[in-house]
């Protein structure tokens, strides 16, 4: 069990699209928007776990065409989120975006997020804990994963909100937003390099 917990911590704390965008939403749009986005990520995280455990993810991701389509969709969506965060400090630039990322945005990101599938596949298919009952093992892994996932993501949201609350100059806030956006786009490029 210790190996599973350690692996889960390392997999979940590694910066990916979810945590980076959550910190970015908290920094750019504040706590209330961040909490809605967090809830979407949480629901999506558990849906991805279900897709992996049920075999639906393997069925869909086994097709190179579907895998490529999901990579393109997730990349486009991450670039959209990154640009909305990057330009949030510039009211003229932000008016081009239809909404502030919320529950639906977080849910959508997790469902098309390649890292979420890699993490869930590693956690649910490795580290046998209860040989006699697959259902109990999955439930225990889900509980442990969520006990790690929730505080890690709340910490990232808090970091974003703290940055916003520091009342930094507009220039520094914009630089932070740009940094968050560039970090998210870097994740897109890394995912593309490993996929293609």
Image: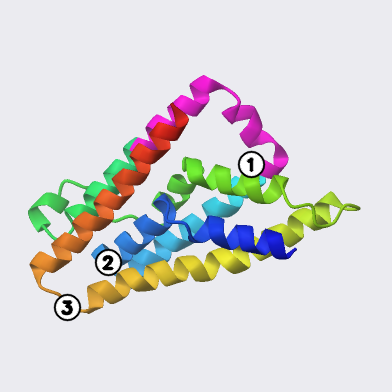
In the rendered view, does 134 fall on the left or right side of 162? right
Q: Nearer the viewer, residue 107 or 9?
A: 9
Rendered residue at 11%/50% (across/down): 93
Q: Is residue 116 above or below residue 60?
A: below
Which residue, given by chain and number where applicable, does mark 1 sit on? 51
Q: Is residue 110 magenta?
A: no
Q: Nearer the viewer, residue 60 or 4?
A: 4
Quarter of the image for the C terminus: give it.
top left
Rendered residue at 16%/61% (across/down): 175
Rendered residue at 32%/36% (across/down): 76
Q: Residues within 10 Å of mark 3 (few under 14, many from 20)?
A: few
Q: Nearer the viewer, residue 79 or 94?
A: 79
Q: Residues within 10 Å of mark 1 (few under 14, many from 20)?
A: some
In x, y percent, where is residue 157? 38, 68
Q: Quadrant of residue 191?
A: top left
Q: Which of disc 2 and disc 1 is earlier in sequence?
A: 2
Q: Is residue 69 magenta?
A: yes
Q: Is residue 30 above or below residue 41?
A: below
Q: Which of disc 3 and disc 1 is earlier in sequence?
A: 1
Range of residues picked out in magenta: 52-75
In the rendered view, does 170 fall on the left or right side of 110? left
SS class of the residue under badge 2?
helix
Which secondary structure class fits the magenta region best? helix
**Mark number, residue 167:** 3
SS class of the residue under badge 3?
loop
Q: Are marks 2 and 3 in contact (CB under 8 Å)?
A: no
Cα gap from disc 1 to disc 3, whole angstroms: 42 Å
């Amino acid at each position: 069990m210790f190996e599973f917990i350690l692996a889960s911590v390392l997999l979940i704390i590694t910066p990916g699209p979810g945590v980076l965008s959550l910190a970015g939403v908290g920094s750019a749009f504040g706590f209330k928007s961040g909490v809605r986005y967090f809830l979407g990520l949480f629901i999506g995280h558990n849906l991805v776990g279900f897709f992996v455990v049920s075999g639906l993810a393997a069925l869909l991701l086994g097709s190179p065409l579907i895998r490529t389509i999901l990579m393109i969709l997730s990349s486009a969506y991450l670039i959209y989120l990154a640009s909305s965060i990057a330009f949030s400090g510039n009211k003229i630039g932000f008016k081009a975006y239809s909404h502030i990322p919320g529950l639906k945005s977080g849910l959508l990101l997790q469902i098309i997020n390649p890292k979420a599938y890699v993490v869930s596949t590693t956690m649910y298919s490795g580290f046998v804990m209860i040989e006699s009952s697959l259902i109990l093992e999955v439930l225990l892994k889900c509980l442990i994963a969520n006990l790690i996932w929730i505080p890690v993501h709340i910490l990232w949201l808090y970091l974003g909100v703290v940055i916003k609350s520091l009342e930094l100059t507009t220039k520094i806030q914009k630089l932070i937003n740009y940094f968050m956006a560039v970090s998210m786009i870097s994740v897109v490029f890394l995912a593309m390099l490993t996929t293609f």
